[in-house]
Image (cartoon, coloured by chain):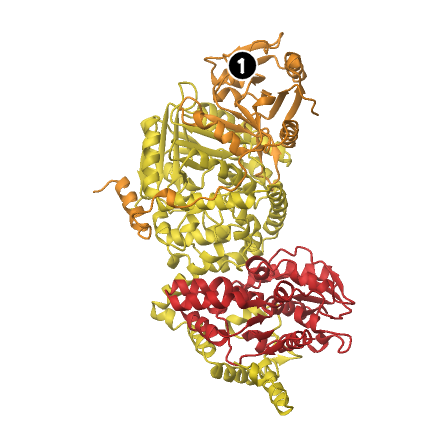
Amino acid sequence: MSSPRDVVLGRIRAALKDVPPTEQPKDVYIDRAYLHVDDGDVHKRLELFIDRVRDYKAKVKVVRPEALAAAIVESCAARSVKRLVVPADLPDGWAPPGVELVREPGLTNEQLDQSDGVLTACALGIAQTGTIVLDSGPGQGRRAITLVPDYHLCVIRQDQVVGLVPEAVVKLEAAAAEPSRPITFISGPSATSDIELNRVEGVHGPRTLEVIVVTELDVV
Amino acid sequence: MRVSLFITCFNDTLFPNTGKAMVALLERLGHQVEFPMGQTCCGQMHYNSGYQRESLPLVRHFVDVFRDAEVVVSPSASCVSMVQEVYPRVAAEFGDESLRREVAALSPRVHELSMFLVDVLGVEDVGAYFPHRVTFHTTCHSKRMLHIGEAPQKLLRKVRGIDLVELPRADECCGFGGTFAVKNADTSIAMLSDKIRCVLDTRAEYCASADNSCLMHIGGGLHRQRAGVNPIHLAEILASTDEDAPAAKEVRS
Amino acid sequence: MSREGVPPLPVSAPAMPFQDAARLSLGDTQLRFNMGKATTTIRAKRYKVVDEMPDWQNLREAGRAIKDRTLRHLDKYLIQLEESVTRVGGKVHWAADAEDANRIVAGIVKSHGAKEVVKIKSLTTDEIGLNEALAHQGIKAYETDLAELIIQLADERSSHILVPAIHKSRAEIREIFRRTLENTEHLGDEPKELAAAARAHLRRKFLTVPVAVSGVNFGVADTGTICIVESEGNGRMCLTLPKVLVSVMGIEKLVPTWRDLEVFLQLLPRSSTAERMNPYTSFWTGIAPPGDGPDEFHLILLDDGRSKVLADRNGRQALHCIRCSACLNICPVYERTGGHAYNSVYPGPIGAILTPQLVGVENAGSLPYASSLCGACYEVCPVKINIPEVLLHLRGEVVRHKQATLAGKLSGENIAMQTVARVFASPRRYEAAQKAGRLGQKLMVKGGVIERLPGQLGGWTAVRDVYPIAPQTFREWWKQREKVSNTKTVPRQEARP
């Protein structure tokens, strides 16, 4: 008896009798006339990013580089965070004093579940969609740490913000090929539209997402 | 211009005033109008009901009748979209290469009335007078297959005396859909109820459209409810002048 | 491959023709209200987020073309995907049908001694009846998407491909939760509270159940990356916490390259939940380092009728579908009947073309007619599936299939259509028919209209009057006019062909 693999491939080849045997995939033309790059003003792009992140009910704070540490302290205090999960390679100076750090590696799911939040960096941000992207790179840790805690505090630098989705996809090409670098796009906190097709924030994933944008520019 | 009318079978049989209005309108605009007597039906009912083999002779017949026309103008967006969108497919499906060529040569000359006036002739003011409150139903085939755009509205806005009111939820199908109205009568009725509610909300005297097929459905429902709102084809409004008063009066009261 | 002992498949011949099932739904006031409200909301939101994209039409065209390229070379790309996934540590299985796929999943679960799985919402696993098949083997599947959970707890069937409980109001959902979940006596009907109840119910499962099952939104042939698009975070939970992950992927859910995702990641969220981007999109390429995600990843490539769809050149485009549900939300028929009337995991316009192709037109002949052909579905489809065109093609198949039987040949509809076609083919017969009809309708016309027609046409006159054949047809008027003008020596002749 032939294997299911042979059966399926055999059926597909029989189904494609109309495709000339000489045709190559590249012979099927793809018109990629859509926008690939936002070459507009950096200031505008950053404002759009902030606006769109807020639009999906994430909190956004904009700070100058020298004010980052204080901003982290303030955010943790505002939520009364006592136990904060952090990746093993948390950048120097980010750890808020007076808060118990639950530091990777090796945390159990239970430890994550009993924490008050998590602090990470990210790979990049997409202005057009208000998205932050994690790719297991520096300061981000593994996937579970940004998922199980109910509060995610994420820091992004101005130069990490791209304009359009295609720009992000290009930048992530290397990570995508690597088993060790799973990628997660995050646009606002966990949400559902399952009840009467109206969006409601907060189900399983972190119910609160807060983004700190670090920039020298004056943006609102 | 020498205009060949494609009146369509149901306008010929059920709504002759629409055709008469087209004749009056086009002659008033200085065109020579003719009606090839050989014409019958475009074959849409058969094709859309799944009787595609049966529609093939009707497609060939249409091409035979109109082959030599300078332009063909029709008061039905639906039948024109049949010619433009579906005829090439019919020819391809049945592997009829000569039919395919003939359709390709003919279909650019086949026009829906309002698009013919606005896009081909470049006319918006046709000198009409129609002192009534009118709402306009854009049919799905005129909007999504022919991409009729604002052509009817452009013409209507130039009609003197008219009180044109926008139809709410104008994008939505009225529920006609040809044999859909019979095969899925219950769903069709549910869609019609909502459309009628929108029409009545406008307080219009007339519900106009560029196609009598949907109007037959909406108008039939309005009439059954004795709603007092008259369906009227766009051509009949455009043909009206202050001399002959509303041509629609005698239409279907 | 017998189906003995396997429960009936959710995608199978609809039990009732669409028009009859629709009649039942149309009378359900709560359903009508819920559907009207939900579709109105989502249409307005979709319009807004699509309208802000200057390159939307370019994206649609690129999406269509990428899918076309993929399907025309599907065998090559599947083999490439198999190689890529294997290279990065995943295990690839092939399933010719639902039974194959269900057996593979059950085998993996059992090999880990597990009795429970957590699931990410997946149409493909609904299609193959995975939950029922697993239950047969003593394995309990927990749906973790909020809407799927509601449906599972209510013991119902989905009515929407994205929002399976779209037909339920918040009050109805509260009742289901109070009936089936613990500690819900004081549960209110605010969506936030309902979502919190689901969170509390499922959190334990995420942390303890060892096997997760998912569908696949996109599989990338060149990198072996798999992508899941979701909103609630239940997907991320299933993808990262359990030790074993099994993903069931329809063979058409493939894109050639990583870069192709730049198109679909824009098209899908705006078309489905009307968001610029859905809250969470996960991508993984094989097995991540220990502690980050599952230690074992299985990808099941499922045919289950898709190769039949592929073989139909006109119907093939149905496989472009990325399951966004924009066509459902815009459809005036779906809006009124809801999803259950389609009697399939795939309802709405896309279901009306996909289900008959998957199960055969002879088993779902009413579905291609479940449309007024208004074309709104084609207009919103992010990958440009010409649904009306495929509906018409399938109607042709239905008719040809009926005409192949004696009963079909002798049916009233067939005889009427043949007769009318003959009449229309000849102007002489057509004119005679007009005259005969005018004579025949005499007794029916009252006050200028006909209020009741016989037989199938009675559906028309249930609520609509009919305009009768005119006392003078247009062509009769034209002939008369020509006669008059000829006697007046108007030089018309040279204009005639």
Image quadrant containing the N terminus of chain C:
top left
Relative to A142, A208 lies left or right:
right
Q: Look at the image and give the colour of chain B.
A: red
Q: Which chain is orange?
A: A
Front residue (pair C21, B7): B7
Q: How many marks?
A: 1
Q: Picture coordinates of residue B193 (x, y %)?
A: 64, 61
* Residue C5 lies in quadrant: top left
Three-letter code, disc 1? Val
Q: Residue at x 48, y 14 (%)?
A: A107
* Residue C105 lies in quadrant: top left
Q: Picture coordinates of residue A165 (x, y %)?
A: 53, 33
Query: Is residue C173 visible from the viewing direction of this image?
Result: yes
Give the structural element (helix, strand or loop) at label 1. strand
Residue furthest to the left in view is A1
Relative to C89, B247 lies left or right:
right
Q: Which residue is mark 1?
A: A86
* Residue B235 lies in quadrant: bottom right
Q: Which chain is yellow?
A: C
